[in-house]
Image: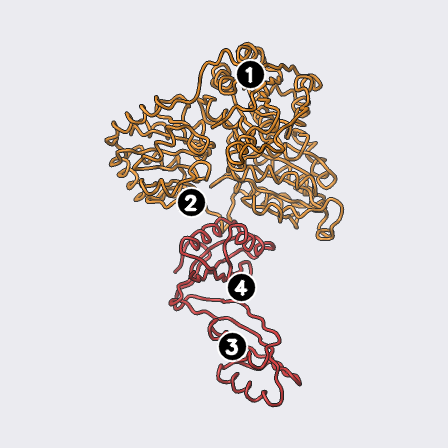
C-alpha cells in the first residue's frame, strides 16, 4: 500500500486505536490535517496548543490509554512545551506530533522554524525528528510503545512537511524492538520476600502511595494489601484516588500542604513503604529525617527514582501492581494495633479545619469543596488548577475511585485544569466533569471556553475568586513579611457575563448559605456552567 | 571527589550526543571528559565519559543515562580492571637551541613528532592522563602554543566485553 507520509501517520494512529486527537493546525502540519480529514479519528480543535497537550493529558488519565495531540511548527510546537513538561513530571502517556519546516530548510531559521526536538529533550521521555518518510510507521509504533510502557510519559514526533508529502510503502511493524528500552516489570522475588518479612515485623508501618499506583491500575491491590495487614496509607498529590478518601486506613495527603495525621504517620513510622511515588520535595521534603527513624521500602517502575532522594533499605524495581499481587500471597498482619490506635487518636485530635460555616460572609472553599464532593456523585471527574484551589481540592474533595482526580502535581502548571477537563469530558462524555480553579489560574486557559462551546462540553467550572494569586499571596504573607506584591488581580472580568458570552449559564455566590442550592443548579443537568465563588483573600491553605 | 569512568553504548543517531550532554548539565553532573566514536557495529557508538562525583552521584548518572532511549548499555569501568588511554597533540615553540632538548623529551616519553616548522614542533602523545600531563608539564618551559586532548577512552582488560544487550560475558 502506497501512502504519503501524512497518510501513513494517520494510518498508524488508526492502527494504534486512536479515537481522538487534540490539536491546532498550521502551515507545516497541513498535509497531516488533509489526510486526517479522510479518517474516522475525531479531532478536537483547542484554542491554544498548550490546551491541546493538557486535553490529551486529561484524556489519557481518564482512559488509561495514550493521549494524542498535534501542533504546527515553530510557535505551535513551542506552545506545547509546558504541556509536555506537565505530562513528563506526572508520568502521563502522551504522543505529540508537530509539523516542521522541510528537511532542506532545517537550520536556516526560516519562517516558523523551531528546534522542537532540542527544546523538548529535557521534558520528553523520547522524541524523534523524522528525516526519512519510510521510518514513519516504525517511529509512530515506537512512540506509542515508549509513551505507554514502563514509566509512562510524553513522546514527541517532529515531522518536516516534505516528509509528510513523500510517498512510501506502508508496513506497520507488529513488534517493537528498541535495544536501549526494555522496562522491567517483574519485581525481584528475593526483594519481595524481604518486603513481606519487613511488613510482618513492623510495629508502625505506613504506605506512601503515589501516582504510579494509578498508572499501574493497582488501586484495588493496594487497598487489599493495606486491609490485609492493617497498614495505614497516605497518598501524594498524584496518588489521590488510589484508595478512597473515606477509607478508614486512608490518612489523606502527606507533605507540606498535607494532612497532619499523614505527616505524623510518616515521621513516627518504623517502616515507610513508598509505592509508585518519587519522594518529591513537596511530599517528603524531609526524607532524610524520615529515613533516620524508619526503614524505607521503595517500589517503582523507574530504577532512577530509587535512591534518588532518599536512602532505601529495600529497593524493588518493577510494576507495582504485579509486585502488590505477589506480596498479597506472602504477607501477614503484624503487631500494629497500638500504631493504628495512635493514628486514630491523632486523626481525632487534628481533624481538617472543617466547620459547617453557615454564617460566613464569603464562600469558604473548604466547605464548598466538601459539599461539592458530597453532591457530585462517586463517578464525577475533578480536575484542578494550581494554587490554593489545588490544595483545598486535594484535601477536601472526597475521591472514591482512581482516575477521577486530575491535577498538575509535579510541574504545578497553572492553566491545566480547564483543558484537562476538556480531555476528560471528551473521553467520558457521560460523566460529570468539574474543574476547580482560582481566578488567576482560570484566566491562564480560559480561551478553552471556546473549545467547550464548539464541542458542546458540559464542563462545570468552579472559580474560587479571591481577586488574586492566593497561593503566592499566602507565601508572601508567611515568608516575606506580608509584603504583598503583584498578587492582586483587580478588575477581573465578570465571570458570569463571560459565561454568557460563550452561551453558558453562570452564577456568582458570595456566602456559604448559597453554596448548596447553587451546586444543585450547577449539577442539575449536563450543560456547561461557571460558578464563581467569592472567597476571602485571607483564607489560608495552611 | 573521585573520578569514575563510564563506558556507554549508544545508538549511532543524530542528536544522541546532545541528549547525553544535556542530561549532564540538566541534572548538575560534572563531566571531566567525554570521548565518542563508532564501534565494530556501525549502528552503535561508544562514549567514554569521565565523571567527577561520589558513588551516589555516579549511580544516578548511570541510571539517568539508562533512561535515555538511545542509550543501550552503561558500565562503570574499574580503574584496575581496565586499560585507559588519552591522545594529545601539543604544539610547542622550538628554537635552534631548544629543539634537541625537546626531541630528547619526546623520545623519553615515547611520543612522536608529527609536524615541524621553523619555530614549532607538534608532538603526538598517547597514554594515561597522568603521562600526557607529565609531558605537558615538561614542555611548558619551552612555550606551549596549543594543546588538544581527546579525553580518556577505555576498555576492560582481558576477555570481558560490554554486550549490546543484557550484561557482559
Q: The orange chain is which one?
A: A
**Residue drawn at (54%, 17%), measured in percent from left and top?**
A363
**Where residue A309 is drawn, which disc sits there?**
2
The residues tagged by marks 4 and 2 sit, at their Cα atoms, a distance apart of 30 Å
Chain-order first, disc 1 or disc 2: 2
User: Of marks 4 and 3, which one's residue comes earlier in the chain?
Assistant: 4
The residue pinned by badge 4 equals B35
Pair 2/3: label in front: 3
* Residues flagged by tags 3 and 1 on a common chain: no
Residue A511, horizontal then vertical, whole percent: 55, 13
Marks 1 and 2, Cα distance to the nearest angstrom?
41 Å
Secondary structure at numbered mark 2:
loop
Q: Which of the pair A344/A328 is nearer the observer?
A: A344
Structural crowding at the residue carrying mark 3, measured as other residues with C-alpha within 10 Å and reported as few (<14), some (14–19) or many (≥20): few
Is the residue at mark 4 from the same chain as the one at mark 2? no
Asked if the residue under mark 2 is in contact with the one under mark 4, i.e. CB atoms within 8 Å, the reply is no
- The chain to which mark 2 is attached is A
Query: For the residues marked 2 and 3, what is the alpha-carbon distance in whole angstroms?
Result: 42 Å
Q: SS of the residue at dot 1?
A: loop
Percent of width and height locating residue A290 = 35, 40
Residue behind mark 1: A362
Q: Quick one: which chain is red?
A: B
Front residue of this view, candidates A537 and B42: A537
Query: Which residue has dot 3 on it?
Result: B137
Write the residue at 62% across / 14% down: A507
Q: What element carries label 3?
A: helix
Q: Residues within 10 Å of mark 2 (few under 14, many from 20)?
A: some
Amino acid at each position: 500500500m502506497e501512502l504519503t507520509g501524512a497518510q501513513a501517520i494517520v494510518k498508524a494512529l488508526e492502527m494504534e486505536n486512536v479515537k481522538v486527537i487534540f490539536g491546532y493546525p498550521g502551515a507545516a502540519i497541513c498535509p497531516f490535517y488533509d489526510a486526517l480529514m479522510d479518517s474516522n479519528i475525531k479531532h478536537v480543535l483547542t484554542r491554544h496548543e498548550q490546551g491541546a497537550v493538557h486535553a490529551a493529558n486529561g484524556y489519557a488519565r481518564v482512559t488509561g490509554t495514550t493521549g494524542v495531540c498535534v501542533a504546527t511548527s515553530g510557535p505551535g510546537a513551542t506552545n506545547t512545551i509546558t504541556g509536555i513538561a506537565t505530562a513528563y513530571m506526572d508520568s502521563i502517556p502522551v504522543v505529540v506530533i508537530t509539523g516542521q519546516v522541510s528537511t532542506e530548510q532545517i537550520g536556516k531559521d526560516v519562517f516558523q522554524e523551531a528546534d522542537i526536538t532540542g527544546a523538548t529533550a529535557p521534558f520528553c521521555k523520547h522524541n524523534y525528528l523524522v528525516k526519512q518518510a519510510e521510518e514513519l510507521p516504525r517511529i509512530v509504533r515506537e512512540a506509542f510503545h515508549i509513551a505507554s510502557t514502563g514509566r509512562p510519559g510524553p513522546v514527541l514526533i517532529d515531522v518536516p512537511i516534505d516528509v509528510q508529502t513523500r510517498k512510501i510503502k506502508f508496513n506497520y511493524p507488529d513488534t517493537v524492538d528498541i535495544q536501549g528500552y526494555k522496562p522491567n516489570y517483574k519485581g525481584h522475588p528475593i526483594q519481595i520476600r524481604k518486603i513481606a518479612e519487613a511488613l510482618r515485623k513492623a510495629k508502625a508501618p505506613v504506605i506512601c502511595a503515589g501516582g504510579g499506583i494509578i498508572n499501574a491500575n493497582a488501586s484495588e491491590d493496594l487497598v487489599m494489601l493495606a486491609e490485609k495487614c492493617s497498614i495505614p496509607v497516605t497518598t501524594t498529590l498524584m496518588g489521590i484516588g488510589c484508595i478512597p478518601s473515606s477509607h478508614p486506613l486512608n490518612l489523606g495527603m502527606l507533605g507540606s500542604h498535607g494532612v497532619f495525621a499523614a505527616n505524623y504517620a510518616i515521621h513516627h513510622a518504623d517502616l515507610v513503604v513508598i509505592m509508585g511515588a518519587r519522594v518529591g520535595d513537596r511530599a517528603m521534603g524531609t526524607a532524610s529525617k524520615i529515613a533516620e527513624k524508619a526503614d524505607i521500602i521503595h517500589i517503582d517502575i523507574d530504577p532512577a527514582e530509587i535512591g534518588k532522594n532518599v536512602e532505601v533499605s529495600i529497593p524493588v524495581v518493577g510494576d507495582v501492581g504485579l509486585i502488590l499481587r505477589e506480596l498479597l500471597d506472602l504477607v501477614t498482619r503484624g503487631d500494629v494495633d497500638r500504631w493504628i490506635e495512635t493514628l486514630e487518636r491523632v486523626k481525632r485530635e487534628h481533624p481538617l479545619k472543617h466547620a459547617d460555616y453557615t454564617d460566613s460572609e464569603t464562600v469558604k472553599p473548604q466547605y464548598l469543596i466538601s459539599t461539592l464532593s458530597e453532591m457530585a456523585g462517586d463517578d464525577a471527574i475533578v480536575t484542578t488548577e494550581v494554587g490554593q484551589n489545588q490544595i483545598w481540592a486535594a484535601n477536601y474533595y472526597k475521591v472514591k475511585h482512581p482516575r477521577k482526580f486530575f491535577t498538575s502535581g509535579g510541574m504545578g502548571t497553572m492553566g491545566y485544569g480547564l483543558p484537562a477537563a476538556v480531555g476528560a469530558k471528551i473521553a467520558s462524555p457521560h460523566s460529570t466533569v468539574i474543574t476547580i480553579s482560582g481566578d488567576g489560574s482560570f484566566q491562564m486557559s480560559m480561551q478553552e471556553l471556546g473549545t467547550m462551546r464548539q464541542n458542546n462540553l458540559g464542563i462545570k467550572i468552579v472559580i474560587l475568586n479571591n481577586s488574586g494569586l492566593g497561593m503566592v499571596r499566602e507565601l508572601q504573607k508567611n515568608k516575606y513579611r506580608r509584603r504583598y506584591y503583584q498578587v492582586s488581580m483587580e478588575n477581573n472580568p465578570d465571570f458570569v457575563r463571560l459565561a454568557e458570552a460563550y452561551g453558558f449559564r453562570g452564577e456568582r455566590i458570595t456566602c456559604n448559605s448559597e453554596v448548596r442550592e447553587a451546586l444543585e443548579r450547577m449539577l442539575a443537568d449536563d450543560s456547561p456552567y461557571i460558578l464563581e465563588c467569592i472567597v476571602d483573600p485571607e483564607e489560608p491553605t495552611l | 571527589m573521585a573520578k569514575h569512568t563510564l563506558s556507554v553504548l549508544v545508538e549511532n543517531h543524530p542528536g544522541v550526543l546532545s541528549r547525553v550532554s544535556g542530561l549532564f548539565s540538566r541534572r548538575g553532573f560534572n563531566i571531566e571528559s567525554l570521548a565518542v566514536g563508532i564501534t565494530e557495529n556501525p549502528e552503535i557508538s561508544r562514549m567514554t565519559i569521565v565523571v567527577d562525583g561520589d558513588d551516589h552521584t555516579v549511580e544516578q548518572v548511570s541510571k539517568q543515562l539508562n533512561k535515555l532511549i538511545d542509550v543501550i548499555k552503561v558500565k562503570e569501568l574499574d580503574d584496575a580492571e581496565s586499560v585507559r588511554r588519552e591522545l594529545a597533540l601539543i604544539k610547542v615553540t622550538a628554537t635552534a637551541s631548544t629543539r634537541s632538548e625537546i626531541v630528547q623529551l619526546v623520545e623519553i616519553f615515547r611520543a612522536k613528532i608529527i609536524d615541524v616548522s621553523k619555530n614549532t614542533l607538534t608532538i603526538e602523545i598517547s597514554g594515561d592522563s597522568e603521562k600526557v600531563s607529565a609531558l605537558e608539564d615538561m614542555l611548558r618551559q619551552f612555550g606551549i602554543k596549543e594543546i588538544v586532548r581527546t579525553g580518556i577512552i577505555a576498555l576492560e582488560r582481558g576477555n570481558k566485553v560490554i554486550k549490546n544487550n543484557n550484561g557482559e560475558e
